[in-house]
Amino acid sequence: MKKFFTIIGGMGTMATESYVHQLNLRTPAHADQDYLNYILVNHATVPDRTAYILDHSQPNPLPSLLDDIRQQSQLGPAFFTLPCNTAHYFYDDLQAATDVPLLHMPRETVKEIRQKFPNAKRIGITGTQGTITDKVYENEVEAAGLTPVLPTDKIEAETMTLIYDHIKENNEVDAALYHRILRQMVDEQHADLVILGCTELSLAQEREPELAIPIVDGQSVLVDRTLEMALKLREE
């Protein structure tokens, strides 16, 4: 296969499925041959990213991710995508292990905010405790000259319940809980818009969309960037 890219997924599997589903839906295709060439690595047994970030005595996901990057690099993909926000904690190590470009989902998400929401200054960040702790979005928001707005302990606890207890464990979205989290970020934390900084939250938005609150979905941005790069690759 030529002119292809590789998706390093499986973190979690249903969230990766959502990413691939949206990518296929947005691909301008009228025949089988119009879809994109890609390899999906659904590495479901990668250790939990948040658990390691919060406690380094827990299993480290990095060796597994490095194996994926090194193995896939031998096949010659044009670029990598990593549809897991928390895994971007390891971005620098992963990019250093290959000459193949690796898209940076949080960075691309903040670029999207600057372009599409130029008047937004207070940027709400939602995600796992790992994503909040490692500041992967917070640092990008600050680098763009914007103000990061973090969840309270209560909001973060509710977010972890939604991500782990409902979506990861039971493959269900508690719509009322999801919408309450977003409303609290705007009403109580005074965010101008809210970043969905976890692909399970992207899945929640896909299944139970919140339409009344300004949202920038990191996974959705990654889908768009993936599509742009893949279509450009096809034309070369």
Image (cartoon, rainbow, N blue to C red):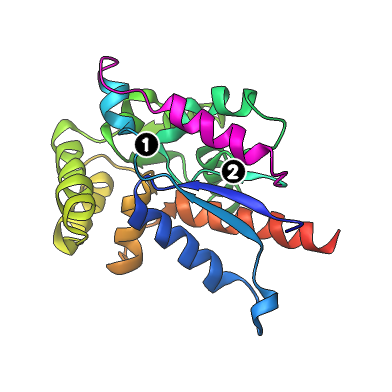
Q: Residue furthest top?
A: 57
The magenta span reads 55-77
Q: Dividing the picture into quarters, in which one does residue 234 lie?
A: bottom right
Q: CA distance from mark 2 to mark 1?
A: 29 Å
- Amino acid at dot 1: Val
The answer to which of marks 2 and 1 sits earlier in the sequence is: 1
Where residue 189 appears, x then y in whole percent?
25, 39
Q: Quadrant of the C terminus?
A: bottom right
Mark drawn on residue 111? 2
Residue displayed at 45% across by 47% down: 9
Q: Residue furthest bottom?
A: 30
Q: Quadrant of the N terminus?
A: bottom right
Element on which disc 1 rests: loop
As rendered, which of 105 and 214 lies closer to the eye? Answer: 105
Bin the neighbour count of mark 1 within 10 Å (Cα to Cα): few under 14, some 14-19, many 20 and up. some
Residue displayed at 70% across by 54% down: 229
Element on which disc 2 rests: helix
What residue did someone put label 1 on?
A: 46
Q: Residue furthest right?
A: 236
Where residue 140 appears, x then y in whole percent?
51, 31
- Answer yes or no: do the residues labelled 2 and 1 have beta carbons within 8 Å? no
